[in-house]
Image (tube, grey):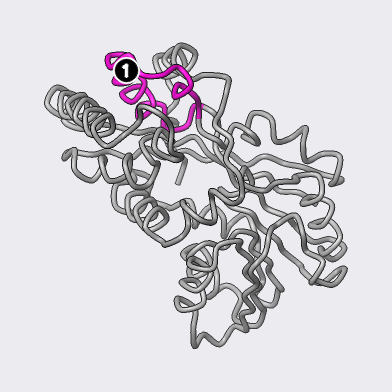
Amino acid sequence: MAQTDFRTPALDALAARIIPREHFVFSTETARDKFFNDTRMLDVKQWVHNVFRTSPTSMVDHMVDNLALTGSEDLLDLGCGNGFILEHIRPHLADGSITGLDIAPAVLAAAKDRLNGTATPCRWIEGSADDLSMLDDNSFDRAMANYMIHYVPDLNRCFTEVRRVLRPGGLFMLTTDRPDSMLEMYDVHFAALEAMGAPKDLVKATPKGRLSLENGQEQLEPYFDEVRLISWQDQLRFTDPAPFMRFYEVGHNHCCASSEEREGVDGEFLSELRDRVRAQVQEAITSKGHFAVTKFTGSFLCQ
């Protein structure tokens, strides 16, 4: 089935107008101790992307196709999170093995519980993706890093290490977004911030701008002989503001506005921000029948 193209001149114009070039940057410690000290952020994102998508195939289906598994590969998942993606990939590795690595003990424990008792051997490692010193050279047929590379402190070391642990002919899949992915969410968010006279340093793009589909090729090419980009699109559609607001507040920390403590961004501020965003979403639902959030994403396949 052909993939729907959600990109339109109107969305391109909107992106050019509202998406800042500057992106948020967060430390590994912030990711470990705040974002992923439990699984709520991941749980909400995964639920929303599954229930409200319009594509008949999921992003995980797309990842499985990209990995081209035969069933006996040894797979390394960098930033495995709560194991949601691995749960779907595991049946394609009936005679292979899985190694999941993550910096956050809470989500790593959730991944271990999720795959507990499966016949595919699983190993779980607490650590950072830029230090794979516990892993042998040439020990994996596949490695992947999905929506997490922006948290890794040293990308040069990470890619050097991935190259080292991959076997000859092995494949590294790095999945991330375009800078204008989910731009409708950013549109209502930035409009609310502007109406509130919010601090200018809150008007930044997703932290995935550190390595996005726009700039990832040039960052990966020094480490791999071949880097191919396979793009993917989807559109989330909401007819009730409530699930979108969970996605916005919990899944994305108010588009990162509440990711770290800062002066003036308190409970009262965030409550008003949510009210203003919710009103815009409800207005779109009333006038158009749904509120759309367009996902422009994809994977770099590196060999």
| Looking at the image, residue 238 lies above or below residue 273 | below
| Looking at the image, residue 290 lies above or below residue 153 | above
Residue at image point 57% right, 40% down: 26
Q: Nearer the viewer, residue 175 or 191?
A: 191
Q: Nearer the viewer, residue 249 or 216?
A: 249
Residue at image point 40% right, 53% down: 41
Side (left or right) of 174 relative to 268: right
In the rendered image, residue 103, in percent from the top left (x then y), is placed at 61, 61
In the rendered image, residue 88, in percent from the top left (x then y), is placed at 48, 67
In the rendered image, residue 220, in percent from the top left (x then y), is placed at 78, 41
Q: Which residues are magenta?
A: 180-205
Residue at image point 15% right, 23% down: 283
Image label count: 1
| Looking at the image, residue 287 lies above or below residue 236 | above
Q: Nearer the viewer, residue 208 or 221?
A: 208
| Looking at the image, residue 284 lies above or below residue 62 | above
| Residue 24 in which image quadrant | top right
Side (left or right) of 15 relative to 171: left
Dot 1 falls on a residue whose secondary structure is helix
Side (left or right) of 273 relative to 282: right
The residue pinned by badge 1 equals 191
| Residue 274 in which image quadrant | top left
Residue at image point 64% right, 34% down: 210
